[in-house]
Amino acid sequence: MDPTCSSESIYNLIPSDWKEPPPPPRYVSVFKAAVKDDEQKFKTAVKTMGPAKLEVPSPKDFLKKHSKEKTLPPKKKFERNEPRKPPVPLRTDHPVMGIQSEKNFINTNAADVIMGVAKKPKPIYVDKRTGDKHDLETSGLVPKYINKKGYGVTPEYIRKRNEEVKKAQEEYDNYIQENLREAAMKRLSDEEREAVLQGLKKNWEEVHKEFQSLSVFIDSIPKKIRKQKLEEEMKQLEHDIGVLEKHKIIYIANKQ
């Protein structure tokens, strides 16, 4: 049974003049007109994609048929009787005979050989019994660089650098000397430094000799203490000897 045909249908409860309400109005910003005015005011031709205005092509310059085809050169009049190649000589024609040159090629060639400079053979070397040949100049076997004019001479930049280092060392020594004078320090001369170094080495030898004379079995406390003391003395002497050998300039404080 169709519900629309029944008088008691629920569709009869909907009023016939009912209409769907219109949608709410779309939001429009109050600054829309001001933004458009500013956009037109500050807009320039550079900000567009390409030139702002282009020349419109003329309707008369339309593409015509066969306008892009290559044109052929103008035709030449063909002459059938025109010769293309020189004619073949006849059997009765004879070549020109009796033309001789007065130049003596034998003497000329002999003079060129006698007066010419002999060509020097290229220096090579053979490194295998099968006869493999190699260039001698690029092999490194020829004393090429030691015969140069500046071979063995110290380069200019190294000499300048050495002079700068020497000058800086002198300035540093002068500065140290002044400070040491104020601090009452004394610099050991080379003879004094060598004497101290030899004395330390002699002391080390004596301590080492005494260390070697210790008994093999260290079974008592006094022996352990003695061995430890000798080891400390040798270690301290080795440290002092290393300091003196490493540093060429030694300063000591004057005793007051």
Image: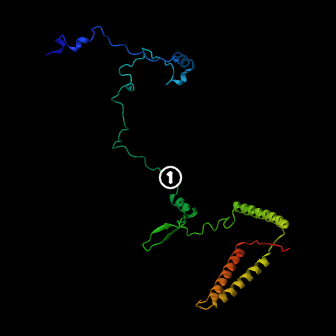
Q: Report the residue at 45% width, 73% height from top.
A: 128
The answer to which image quadrant residue 120 occupies is: bottom right
- Tally the numbered discs: 1
Q: In the displayed image of the protein, which residue is found farthest to the front?
A: 8
98 and 128: which one is in front? 128
152 and 18: which one is in front? 18
Q: Point out the image quarter for the N terminus.
A: top left
Q: Report the residue at 57% width, 63% height from top.
A: 117
Q: Report the residue at 84% width, 64% height from top.
A: 178
Q: How is the image coloured?
A: rainbow
Residue 205, horizontal then vertical, whole percent:
68, 86
Residue 123, horizontal then vertical, whole percent:
53, 67
The answer to which image quadrant residue 60 occupies is: top left
Horizontally, residue 47 falls left or right of residue 187, namely: left
18 and 244: which one is in front? 18
Q: Report the residue at 82% width, 64% height from top.
A: 179
58 and 222: which one is in front? 222
Residue 156, horizontal then vertical, whole percent:
71, 61
Local secondary structure at mark 1: loop
Horizontally, residue 123 falls left or right of residue 233, namely: left
Horizontally, residue 227 falls left or right of residue 5, namely: right
Per the image, the residue denoted by label 1 is 101
What amino acid does circle 1 point to?
Answer: Ser
The answer to which image quadrant residue 3 occupies is: top left
Residue 241, horizontal then vertical, whole percent:
70, 78
Q: In the displayed image of the protein, which residue is found farthest to the left?
A: 1
